[in-house]
Amino acid sequence: MTRTIHIALDINGQRHELDIEPRVTLLDALREHLSLTGTKKGCDQGQCGACTCHVDGQRVLSCLTLAAQAEGREITTIEGLTGEAGDLHPVQAAFIEHDAFQCGYCTPGQIMSAVACIREGHAGSDAEIREYMSGNLCRCGAYNSIVAAVRQAAEVA
Ligand code: FES
C-alpha cells in the first residue's frame, strides 16, 4: 500500500493542502498536483536549472527538493513574479526586450535565477552574471541576450 502524507505548501502567497507520497518532489507537486506548470522539468536530476524556484527567497532546484521539505516555507514560482495587476517583473520585461529566449523552455528557470542573482548582488559585471547563471542551461544558446537582460534589470532594480 502506498503511504501518503498531508502537507500544506505556501506558494505565491496562497496555501495549498495536498496528500502526496513522501517521495514527491517539489517540482512534481507544483506541476502534477497543483497545475503550476510554469516551473519546467528538464533533466530531473539537478543539472539544467529549468526547475528553479525560490524557497524563503533562496533559489532551489525543485527537482532535488522534496515537497515535504518545503512545508512551512515561502515558495515562489514564476507564476508569482507578476504584480497583482498582472504587470511584469522587471526581469521578465527585460527578457522580452532583449529577446532573451528562443524556444522558451528554460526561461522560467532563467528568470527565477536572474531575480536571485540581482537580489543577492551578483550582477555587477557580465562575468559575474555568467558565473551565477551558469547552472541554468539554454540549449538554444541565448546566453548573450540573457546576460544583457539581467544587466538591464539589475540597473533598474
Ligand atoms: Fe531540475 Fe534540471 S529539472 S535541474
Image: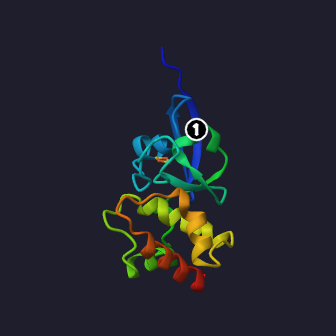
Q: Is residue 99 left or right of residue 68?
A: left
Instruction: Using the image as rendered, state which of residue 157 and residue 17 is in the foreground.
Output: 157
Residue at the location (51% across, 32% down)? 19
Instruction: Using the image as rendered, state which of residue 35 and residue 144 is in the foreground.
Output: 144
Q: Residue furthest bottom?
A: 156
Instruction: Using the image as rendered, state which of residue 113 and residue 78 is in the foreground.
Output: 113
Q: Position of residue 14 (x, y in %)?
A: 54, 55
Q: How does the figure colour the protein chain or chains?
A: rainbow
Query: Is residue 86 shown to the viewer in this render?
Result: no
Q: Position of residue 108 (x, y in %)?
A: 44, 61
Label 1 SS: loop
Residue at the location (62% across, 75% down)? 123
Q: Which residue is mark 1?
A: 66
Quarter holding the C terminus is: bottom right
10 Å crowding of disc 1: few (<14), some (14-19), many (20+): some
| The image quarter in which residue 144 lies | bottom left
